[in-house]
Image: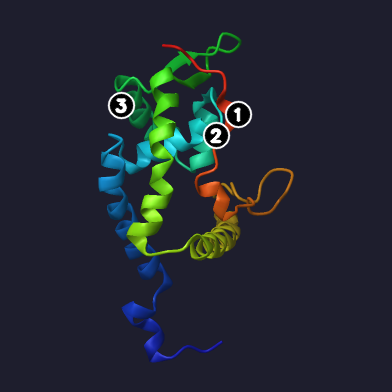
Amino acid sequence: MSGSENDLTLERQLCFALSVASRSVITAYKPVLGALELTHPQYLVMLALWERSPRSVKDISSSLLLEPATLSPLLKRLEASGLITRARDTADERVLVISLTRKGAELRRKALSVPGAMLSRLGLSRAEAAQLHTTMTKLIVAAQSASNDAGVPDAFTTGPASSPPEWSPSDISAPNAANASLDTA
């Protein structure tokens, strides 16, 4: 496929649009997450823990596609805030296990307002957000597939399903009863 001179304009670059969109959306989250006293990366960690706690650092790292070394300072700050605990696994001391504290689990109730607030701030309907999420997930899978030759981990296509995770607009605020057991620290 032959390109044209216009293909090299900044405005036509997918990477540029994605980079600006990412920075802009994360900036839009700041005041909403500020009310929870969380940064965006800390919010992502908390989302992973609200899905399932306790979890190993390796498991959280894999879910968020972050290196453990990147995750470590986030976990230290969340622990200092009283939202999580970090402890060595009694069965394998090499494994660091992260658990929600009662305060961390209770923060989830306040966080239930975040997805709706963000839809409003971004001017998106739930259906538009679901379509955008589906499109972005396909893009992630395609980019990871293209990167696999370079040995990049493929979190969206590994595992039994080998397909993007299913998502529906109701997932934005649907409570997860799976976190009934809490660390009381």
Residue farthest along the top direction in this orientation: 90
Task: State the SS at label 2.
Answer: helix
Disc number for residue 77: 3
Dot in front, 1 or 3:
1
> Which of the two discs, 1 and 2, labels the residue nearer the N terminus?
2
Q: Are marks 1 and 2 in contact (CB under 8 Å)?
A: yes
Quadrant for residue 35, please give it.
top left
3D distance between C-alphas at marks 1 and 3 = 25 Å
Quadrant for residue 51, please give it.
top right
Three-letter code, disc 2: Glu
Quadrant for residue 184, please give it.
top left
In this rendering, is residue 21 above or below 34? below
Three-letter code, disc 3: Arg
- Residue at which label 1 appears: 178
Please indicate, yes or no, whether residue 151 appears anywhere in the rendered image.
no
Q: Are marks 1 and 3 in contact (CB under 8 Å)?
A: no
Three-letter code, disc 1: Ala
The residue drawn where x is 31% and y is 35% is 36
Task: State the SS at label 1.
Answer: helix
The residue drawn where x is 37% and y is 53% is 118
3D distance between C-alphas at marks 1 and 2 = 7 Å
- Expressed as whole percent of the image width and height from the top left, the position of residue 95 reads 53, 19
Where is the N terminus found, in terms of image quarters?
A: bottom right
- Residue at which label 2 appears: 51
In this rendering, is residue 91 above or below 145? above
